[in-house]
Every structure is written in C-alpha cells, then in structure tokens.
Image: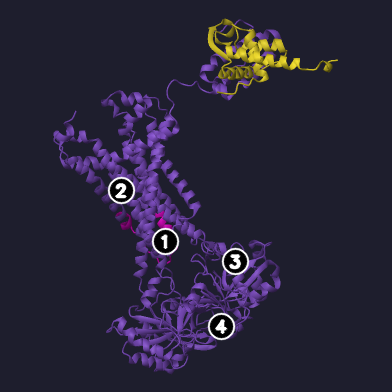
C-alpha cells in the first residue's frame, strides 16, 4: 500500500520500471524497498531534485550481473548437451517409427540438394572461366562494331594495321599487345608419328600475357620464325618420355620447327584450352602471302588482337581512346562506322553476345536461369519437408504437450525441432553427395563440362556446412514455430477434442498454399521443357534443302595438292564407293564468306549488295542434292557457266527478283548470269533466317571435298575403299572426314543441351512434388481412417471414398495450373522471341502439361486413397 | 570457495553491518556509511558487496518484516557471521601489528 499524502513526492516512475525490467524477480522487492526508503529520507534532507537524482543513480548502479541472475532453483538443471542428446534420441525414434515418411523426407530433400549442388558446381565453373591466367583482370581482346545496311554487327576479328596503330599511338596504355591467328588444325609429325592438333600462330608476347606455366625450356623463343612451344600433352604424345627441347617437329608436312619450350596444358575452363601448340607470328607472315598483304589493309578483318592494359590504365579509359582508331586511319572504312573496343577477358565467356551493337543476354542468362531453377528445386524439397512435418505434427502434439507440462520452454521446443530438421538435412546432405558423385559423369556429358567435386577444398566444406544448416533451418522453420505454439492444456485435455485443436477451417491453408507453390513451379518447368523440345523439333523438321544422309566431307588442309583434282575425282568414282564428288569453299551447311559489292538490275542504290559467296565445282549440286526451283544446275557442257551463278531462294527474294533465271549480275567487274535458283539450304543456325547466297564455279576458292556415298554400300565399306585414294593423293595427312548429317546435328547442340537439362530438372521437380503429395495423401488418408470406416459401414462405395480423398488435391493442382499457365506463357513467349524460325506457343502444349500434371497427381493420390478405401472397417474401428 | 581476501569497501560494509546489528539492511548500511565516512555511496555498490560477502560466508541474511516507510516492502536483514567477525578481527590485528612496528622517529 502506498501512502500518498498530498505534497508527498514520488520517485521517477520510469526508473522503477527499469529496475523491475532487469532485476531478478526475487530481489526486486527488497531493492525497491531500500530505494524507496532512501528516497524518502533524502527528500527530507536534501530536497526533491537531489533525491530523484540519487534515486536514478542508484537504479543505474544496481544494473549488475550478480543482481540480475535468477534465483538458483531446487531442481536439476540439465545442460544444453543433455537436452541435445535427448532431442537426437527422440528424432531417431521418430525417424525409425515412421519409415515411409522419413524415407520420403530424406530422399526428397537429398534429390533437391543434389540438384542444387550440381547446379552450384556448374555455376561456379561458369563463373571461374579464364581465371587460370594471372593477368585475367587486365587482358582483353579488341573487338569492333561495324554497320552494314543499317544493321550493326560485332566481331572479334580485327585488321592487322590496328595492331600497329595501337603500338604506335597508345603504347603507354598497354603492357603487352599480341596478334594471333585463329585456332586451326595442323598436322604435327616427328619421324613416323603424326598427329592432328589445334594451334595458333602468335606474337612473342602471347605466352607472357597468358602467363603460361613453362615446364621445360623457355617461353622467349617466339621471335624466331623457326621455333615452337608445345603444350605438355602434345609434347608427351610426340616425344613420350624423351626431352623435347631442341628437337625438331614437322608441321603440315612442309615446315620444320625447333621446340624451345613446353608449357602446362591450359585447363578446360579457359578460352584457349584447345590451343595445344604455338607457332611464331613471323612464320605466319612468311608463309601466307595474304597475311603479309593484310599488314596494310584496314579492310581485312581477319585476326585476333589481344592486349593486356597497363597497371595505371582502365578498360574504359582505353576504350575512349581507341574507339575511332579505324575511322581515323582508313577513310574508305569510315562508312561502316567502325568502333573499336576492348572486351575484357572476364567477360569473354558469359557476356559475348551483341545485337545491333548493344550487349545482350549471352551465356550469363543460363547461369541465372539454372541458378533460379536450382533454388526452386531445393525450395520444392524443403516444402515437402515442411508439409510432411506439419501434417504429422498432430501426432506429436502430445509430446509437445507433455514437454511443456514438465517445464519445457517454447525456445527449447523450437531448438528441438530445429535440431531434428538439421539432423535430417545432414542425412540428406550425405546422400546428396553420393548422388552428386554418381551423376557427375552424366551431368558433365550433357553440360559439356569437366567438373569434379572439389573434395579437398576447405571452403567448399564450409559452404556445404552452411548450406546444410540453411536447408535444415529453412525446412524446419515452419514446423518448429507451429508445433511449439501448441497449448498444453488443449492438447492434453482429452482424446476427443485433442485431435481437433487446430483443424479449424483455415488450419490447412498454409499447407495447401505450399502444395500450390510446388505444383506451380513444377508445371511451369514442364511447360518450359515442352516448349524447348518442341522448338528443337520444329527446327529439325525444317526443310534442309539438301540430302545430308550419306554425304561425306573432307577438309583440304594446306598440304592437299592443288592440281590434279580431276584425277582425284576419277579415282574416287572408280572405287564405286562414291556416286559424285565435288569441291566447295564452305561446308555444305555453312556459308563462310560474303561480299558486299554485287549489283543487279533494279537494285536500290542505297542497298548494300551483301551476299554470301560459295565457290563450287560443277558437280556440287548433284553431290549435295540441290532442289531446283527455277533454271538449271551447273554443267561441264556449257563453258559459259564459268560466268554463271546459282542463287538460293533467299537471294532471289533479297534481290527482289520474281524470275531470277537469266538475270545479269555485276560483280568484281564481271557480268554474271543467274542460271538457276535453288530451294534454300539451311546454313548457319537452323533457328535463324537463311543468308542470301550465290554459288559460283570457282575451284580456286575451294577447301572442302564432298562425296556422295554409294547407297548400295555400307558407310564402313565405302570408307575402306576411299581411304587408299586419299592416301595416294595426300600421303602426309591422316584421312579425316565428317558426315554432313553429324555436322548438321551439331547445330542443335546448344538448344539440345538446354532441352536435356530442362527435361532433367522438370522431371526432378515433378518427382519431388509427387513424393511430397504421396506422403501428404497417405498421411491424410491414415488420419481419416475412422471416418472412412464409418462411411463404409454406412454404405459408401470405394469409388465414393476415392473421389472424396482425391478431390482436395486435384483442386490444389488445378489452381496451380491456373497460376502456372500465364507465367509459363510469358516466359516462353519471351524465350521464343530470340529465334526467327520458331514454333508457335500452341494450346496443346499447355493442355498436355496440365493434363499430365493432373494425371500424375491422380495416380499418386489414388494409390493412397484406394488403399485407404479398401481397408476393412472392422479393423479400423474395432479398438476404441 | 571464492577468495577470502577482504577489500577496503567490503571491510567498511562489514563494519557497518556489525554496527547496525539487528537492523542491518541495504538502505541502513548506506545511511551508516554516509554518516560515518561522510561520502556518498551507491545502493548498487552496497548490494553487490553484501552479495559477495554472503557468498564468502562473512554475513548471512534473512527476510525481515515489511514496514510502512518502505511503501510496504520487506527488507533483507544481514548479520555478521563468526567467520565475518574473525575476518574483521584479523584485519584489525594486522593493522595494529603494523602500527606497532612503525619506528618512533617517524613521527618526531
């Protein structure tokens, strides 16, 4: 009781409240008493102000750990370790008691984790490209934007004079500048040993710039034209155990080089990983007259130009300096508005696509895409875990009630459920590692990677630990918070009401939401996969324009004899294995060169006459199987055909000609006549429009031999007969050939990879979702056992019961379909926009995905529903 | 067992408890010290010291009755134990011994 006379002062209220908030309960009373007493005394002796001030000071001085400690209790105070032991024991008992649910939980979670780990490894690999090179962050290649016919194209090919100009005008901005040829096949020989390997001709600074690790000899020999550096693998292949230094190798059966150095093979995750030997740039200049001529030609964009910028410089600075370098030096090139820029090595792999001069998507989109998919698959697995745990929580309600009744705090219960879920996550993680190890070879195959799991990397284990903890916490969060919130009185009150303590109308809402999310993600992935597969199918079914089965091509490397081509042809036909033989300047389904100076009657003077050019021999059409729309094929019977042209349909359209045959076309000062128009042959990407192309009889350009095999023989027999002929004409080279059908299939590689990966991920998503549904439905069926029994006794049929149990889930999946359809439509519509030749987003794809999802749901749920409906009601009802 | 060494402030508190025997609680000890030594002390310091003394076994305590002047709150009454008394005596003896060994010339 407080004595509150009028005029009687009271101590500051907040200070009293503060005292109560921190002070141990058993001390609060006496301390307050002391404070109060002192306050009263001081009011009298020193005045109110002073008394209040001292009161506050006293309260603050009481804030000491020894006064905050709770009173030691009478009962045993188990340590955290004891409780943890108990939690783990209970967790094990629970897992063992409900084997099905535990298996579903752990398998689902481990599949999700394995997927996330695989995707994580893949992303890591993608992001660590080129980091092998020490000066990774300062190396760049020079690239150019150029505009033709209003379209800006971007290319890493540069003219040689640019290199000289950089050296002359901006030498202080660069540590190294090195030109390089493209990576090409060459034949390396030591004695009788011959290999075909890829290599580059490079300037002497290249090994320093790329910080090649020299294993033997020296890197500093490349300024001598007669010297070569070999990668370790090539050196071993050529020389075995011998020391290769100062030995001589023969390249392309013509030139000899002395080996001065051996470098460690560049790893697979570098841009130059297939460069297995280096030849000197000086040799390239000596050997190839056109290269020498290019040294002064700004118009020939044919070389790779690599730079390492100086330490005090930045890419942006250098870019602004060199942007107009070409337009400045070459007035005749200025009309293409050439803009040079540096493309940093760190961006080569993931950001290398431009559209009309603007950087677009590139490979990074796949890193994002798969990252998101991986996160979603993991999320699905976590949702399973949450769903099953909350669904089963009613069974553990009593445990929670009893724990609370004997004094468990809510925080302890939360800790218990978290430790349980972390334990399950750990099991799942171990299983996931096993799965990753098993599926890595397959994954590497379809993703075209050489990933190994970095078992010895401590950082990875740290990540893995964090990852497992995160998953455990994520998966356990909902059950931990939900279960620990039970009221013990309600839970323990009685059997009748206890099972209904939270089964109100909205109790299942969170669970249902999670199921909907799960199926939305799965169905979206399935629709996406179907669209990708459909798009690949669509492009594969595109009319190809030539007959690719039984068509063989041989690349004529530099050591092929240029003369006696007719004799070679006669000999090949003589074997009976070849029906036709012809030569051309590009592979059958590619166009490798183009020229912008064609003109024809009726041409708009502003239009650039830019057409693809292919040189062929007269039998080319017969060999590849052209289909003519107008006119005729080349023929040896007409000598005028040397100034004749066969054009493709796209070219006829591009030139605006209805009746193209007979049209006169000017090119290079000559008057050509179009003698025929062929149906389009798919060249370049099968998803893109076909390049307008002209074919001319120019045997001097040709570098590929095409052979139409005799269908009466198997390919093996035919090859066996052809090989001796090639040996005879080109004894120095191994007989290497490609089938046109294989080459054509390669065009689909990137899209097929996406197709395969998304098929895999979509299947996993559906699998995990169904696993969860299976567990959930079996649990709910079990819970409603008595209800089902009573219904059966009252005359419900199995069909009725099946309908009753399946309906709920079907509704959820239907809602998920409704959500997923617009999302998938939007995403896939955008994806398809990247392809000019694309399939329509037809309704049947959505119908199929939805139908499939419903069917698979029904199948999963029905299994449990029918099982429950078939139970004998006597058994389910008898013990009560 | 914690160390039995007695700090200067603890010694003062222990003496105050002995002076106020029968009515030695927090506020009383504060008053006693303030009167005897003429310096202000914080209640927190006093309580902490009392706690420590109790842990060391130099004082013991029991709850006393509630009084109106404290707003009806009860007080904890402290009594010096035999051990506490011995500790005080020891200190006094030590001091005396030291006093006795000061040479006379120091003061002259």
Circles 4 and 3 in contact, beta carbons < 8 Å: no
Judged from the image, the secondary structure of the residue bearing numbered disc 2 is helix
- Distance of mark 4 from mark 2, alpha carbons? 64 Å
What colouring method underlies this structural image? by chain
**Mark 3 to mark 2 CA distance (whole Å):** 49 Å
Q: Chain of mark 4?
A: A
Tell which subunit mark 2 falls on: A
The chain painted yellow is: B
Relative to A714, residue A478 above or below: above
* Image: magenta residue range: A825-847
Query: Eyeballing the image, is A364 above or below A641?
Result: above
**Which image quarter: residue B11?**
top right
Chain bearing mark 3: A
- Residue under numbered circle 1: A832
Which quadrant does the C terminus of chain A fall into?
Answer: top left
Looking at the rendered structure, the number of numbered marks drawn on it comes to 4
A439 lies left or right of A305: left
Q: Residue at label 2?
A: A770
Q: Which residue is mark 3?
A: A140
Q: Chain A is which colour? A: purple
> Does residue A709 appear in this view?
no
Q: Position of residue A528 (x, y in %)?
A: 37, 56
Q: Which mark is residue B52?
A: none
Disc 3: CA contacts within 10 A as few (<14), some (14-19) or many (>=20) = many
Which mark lies nearer to you, 4 or 1? 4
């Amino acid at each position: 009781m407080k004595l509150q006379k009028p005029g009687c002062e009271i101590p500051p209220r907040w200070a009293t409240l503060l005292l109560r908030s921190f002070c141990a309960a058993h001390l609060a009373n006496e301390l307050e008493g002391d404070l109060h007493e002192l306050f009263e005394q001081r009011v009298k002796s020193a005045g109110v102000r002073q008394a209040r001030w001292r009161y506050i000071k006293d309260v603050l001085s009481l804030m000491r750990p020894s006064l905050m400690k709770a009173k030691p209790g009478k009962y045993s105070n188990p340590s955290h370790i004891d409780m943890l032991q108990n939690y783990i024991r209970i967790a094990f008992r629970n897992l063992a008691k409900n084997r099905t649910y535990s298996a579903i939980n752990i398998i689902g979670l481990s599949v999700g984790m394995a997927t996330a780990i695989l995707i994580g490894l893949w992303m890591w690999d993608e992001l660590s490209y080129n980091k092998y090179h020490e000066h990774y962050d300062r190396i760049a290649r020079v690239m150019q934007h150029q505009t033709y016919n209003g379209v800006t194209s971007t290319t890493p090919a540069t003219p040689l004079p640019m290199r000289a100009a950089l050296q002359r005008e901006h030498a202080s901005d660069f540590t190294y500048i090195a030109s390089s040829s493209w990576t090409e096949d060459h034949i390396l020989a030591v004695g009788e040993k011959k290999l075909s390997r890829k290599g580059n001709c490079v300037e002497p600074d290249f090994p320093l710039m790329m910080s090649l690790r020299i294993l033997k000899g020296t890197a500093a020999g490349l300024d001598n034209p007669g010297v070569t550096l070999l990668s370790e693998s090539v050196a071993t292949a050529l020389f075995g155990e011998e020391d290769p230094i100062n030995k001589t190798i023969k390249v392309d059966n013509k030139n000899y080089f002395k080996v001065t150095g051996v470098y460690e093979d560049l790893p697979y995750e570098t841009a130059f990983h297939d460069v297995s030997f280096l030849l000197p740039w000086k040799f390239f200049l000596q050997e190839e007259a056109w290269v020498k001529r290019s040294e002064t030609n700004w118009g020939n964009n044919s070389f790779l130009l690599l730079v390492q910028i100086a330490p005090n410089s930045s890419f942006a600075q250098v870019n602004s300096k060199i942007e107009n370098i070409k337009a400045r030096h070459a007035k005749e090139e200025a009309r293409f508005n050439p803009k040079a820029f540096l493309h940093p090595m760190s961006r080569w792999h993931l950001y290398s696509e431009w559209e009309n001069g603007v950087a677009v998507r590139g490979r990074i989109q796949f890193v994002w895409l798969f990252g998101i998919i991986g996160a979603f698959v993991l999320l699905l697995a976590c949702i399973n875990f949450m769903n099953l745990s909350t669904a089963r929580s009613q069974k553990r309600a009593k445990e929670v009630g009893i724990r609370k009744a004997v004094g468990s705090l809510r925080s302890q219960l939360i800790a218990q459920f978290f430790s349980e879920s972390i334990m399950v996550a750990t099991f799942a993680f171990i299983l996931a590692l096993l799965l990753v190890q098993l599926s890595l070879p397959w994954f590497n195959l379809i993703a075209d990677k050489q990933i190994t799991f970095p078992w010895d990397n401590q950082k990875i284990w740290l990540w893995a630990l964090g990852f497992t903890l995160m998953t455990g916490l994520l998966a356990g969060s909902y059950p931990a918070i939900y279960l620990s919130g039970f009221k013990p009185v309600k839970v323990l009150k009685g059997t009748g009401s206890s099972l209904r303590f939270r089964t109100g109308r909205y109790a299942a809402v969170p669970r249902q939401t999670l199921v909907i999310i799960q199926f939305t993600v799965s169905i979206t992935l399935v629709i996406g996969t179907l669209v990708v597969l459909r798009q690949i199918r669509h492009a594969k079914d595109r009319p190809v324009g030539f007959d690719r089965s039984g068509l063989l091509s041989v690349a004529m490397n530099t050591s092929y004899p240029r003369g006696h081509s007719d004799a070679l042809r006669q000999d090949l036909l003589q074997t009976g294995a070849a029906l036709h033989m012809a030569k051309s300047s590009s592979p059958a389904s590619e166009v490798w060169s183009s020229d912008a100076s064609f003109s024809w009657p009726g041409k708009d003077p502003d239009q650039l006459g830019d057409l693809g050019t292919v040189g062929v021999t007269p039998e080319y059409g017969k060999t590849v199987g052209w289909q003519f729309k107008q006119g005729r094929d080349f023929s040896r019977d007409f000598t005028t055909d040397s100034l004749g042209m066969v054009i493709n349909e796209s070219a006829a359209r591009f030139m605006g000609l209805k009746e193209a045959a007979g049209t006169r076309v000017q090119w290079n000062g000559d008057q050509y006549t179009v003698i025929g128009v062929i149906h389009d042959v798919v060249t370049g990407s099968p998803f893109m429009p076909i390049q307008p192309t002209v074919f001319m009889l120019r045997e001097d350009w040709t570098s590929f031999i095409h052979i139409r095999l005799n269908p009466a023989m198997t390919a093996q027999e035919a090859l066996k007969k052809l090989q001796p002929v090639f040996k005879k004409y080109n004894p120095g080279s191994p007989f290497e050939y490609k089938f046109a059908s294989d080459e054509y299939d390669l065009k689909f590689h990137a899209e097929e990879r996406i197709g395969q990966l998304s098929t895999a991920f979509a299947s996993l998503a559906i699998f995990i979702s169904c696993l969860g549904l299976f567990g959930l439905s079996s649990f709910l069926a079990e819970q409603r056992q008595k209800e089902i029994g009573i219904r059966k006794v009252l005359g419900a049929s199995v069909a009725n019961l099946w309908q009753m149990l399946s309906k709920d889930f079907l509704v959820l999946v239907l809602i998920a379909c409704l959500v997923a359809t617009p999302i998938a439509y939007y995403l896939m519509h955008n994806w398809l926009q990247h392809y000019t030749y694309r399939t329509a987003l037809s309704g049947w794809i959505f119908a199929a995905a939805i139908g499939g999802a419903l069917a698979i749901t029904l199948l999963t749920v029905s299994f449990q529903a029918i099982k429950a409906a078939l139970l004998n009601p006597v058994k389910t009802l008898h013990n009560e | 067992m914690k160390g039995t060494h007695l700090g200067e402030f603890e010694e003062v508190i222990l003496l105050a408890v002995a002076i106020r025997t029968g009515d030695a609680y927090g506020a009383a000890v504060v008053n006693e010290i303030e009167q005897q030594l003429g310096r202000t002390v914080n209640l927190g310091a006093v309580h902490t010291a009392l706690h420590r003394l109790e842990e060391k076994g130099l004082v013991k305590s029991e709850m006393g009755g509630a009084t109106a002047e404290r707003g009806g709150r009860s007080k904890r009454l402290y009594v010096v134990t035999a051990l506490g008394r011995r500790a005080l005596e020891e200190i006094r003896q030590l001091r005396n011994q030291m006093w006795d060994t000061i040479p006379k010339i120091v003061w002259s």
